[in-house]
Image (cartoon, grey):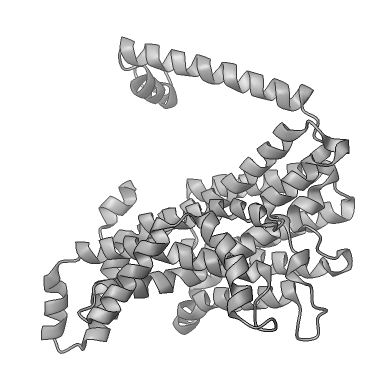
Amino acid sequence: MDRTGLPALAQRLRRELFASRTDGLITLVLLGALVALGGGFLRWALVQAQWAVVQANSTLFAVGRYPLDQQWRLWLLTTLLAAATGLSWGLLRGRSWPRNDTIAAVLLVALAVAAPLFLQLTLAIQARWWWITALLLALRWGAGRWGDRLPAAWRRLWPLLWPLLYLVGMVLISGGLGLMPVRPSDWGGLLLTLVQSSFAILLCFPLGVALALGRRSELPLLRWGSVIYIEFIRGAPLITLLFLGQNILGFLLPGGLAPDRVWRAAWVLTFFAAAYVAEAVRSGLAAVPRGQMEAARALGLPVPQALIHVVLPQALRVALPATVGQFITLLQDTTLLSLIGLLDLLGVARTVMANPAFLGKNAEVYLLLAVLFWCCCAALGLGSRALETRLNPNPLSAARA
């Protein structure tokens, strides 16, 4: 309590929201608009909306036509991802539990409890989601508490867990190594969206860095080749490139060598995003003073090592926000896959809304899509901000961010 007798929180709200008459009027108007909009939305969501369309098609939205008897592989992959997330979260944060981590943990628990009940899933599936959430949070706590006891070499190598897990996940999803193959045409929904976007994100980044370096190269052939590629890709709409990739590969490659339609789209997304990532990285390279390269060369470093150890770390730190923004745009651009006949999230939604049993239920379906895409984009954004804070050489500015 302070001398006015009001709690500190009330004083803070008064200072930030009602510092003057104008601020107070703006605050009241905005609060009134938010209450009116929020009340109308809740009234529609709780009384008028018919969520049976989501409950009846929850599996289709999640995995498409993936065979029912092979879906245990997806549950195993989800468990492994949760375990890796908990370990990484704990090792990065250590023993501390900042307010953001507490909020994230509470949201995860609330989602694990509310989502299965809302979707009216069976008790067995609900128990799986509760187990996965409990495993993630338990490993977060355990890795944060005892992670510093691990050898330093192990802590340096733990990021390699993610590329290894990605390869294991692709084997689990597609089959092989003794597992029954599942055709990419049977993938769909959120599974196909995440596979396409993650594949493109992982490959477009190194390709974009190579193109940015090529555009700044002193070799004319390499420089102009990079420029032509980047400008051509940036000047063509993505949907045009998707249709081109679906059709032209069948003519250029023999029938047995042409990749599946799903992988054709994935490669088009990769090449498309690489051109934009190259421009983001090029802006980062332009922000690095020329003296950095000259100083590295004066110390005896060859050009490749000077780029890798001196120039690129600074350039990528500058280009990180724009690059992650491009990744988020790429994730959203996967909705165009429905126009070439692939059952991504939007493709599944269009299929469900075409069912005569669910005609007129468009708002419920589109709201579900918006929430799913928001969750994925928010995860990318939070990861980006955490990485920016970790890479920021100025701890004071990092703390303010």
Would you place residue 54 above or below residue 89 in this image?
above
Q: Which of 103 and 43 is in front in this view?
A: 43
Of residues 154 and 240, which is closer to you in this image? 240
x 27%, y 81%: residue:
221
Q: In this view, does 159 lie above or below 335?
A: below
Residue at the (43%, 69%) spot, across then down:
205
Please name the residue shown 65% across and 49% down the image.
Answer: 108
**Could one spot residue 112 in this view of the protein?**
yes
Residue 370, x across and y down, in percent: 62, 41
Does any portion of residue 88 appear in the rendered image?
no
Residue 289 relative to residue 241: left or right = left
Q: Nearer the viewer, residue 324 or 275?
A: 275
Q: Residue 317, image x and y in percent?
A: 31, 63
Nearer to us in this view, 185 or 171 = 185
Q: Tell me which corner region of the image, top left, top right, bottom left or bottom right, holds residue 208.
A: bottom left
Q: Is residue 27 above or below residue 75?
A: above
Residue 32 lies left or right of residue 224; in this view the side is right
Q: How many marks?
A: 0
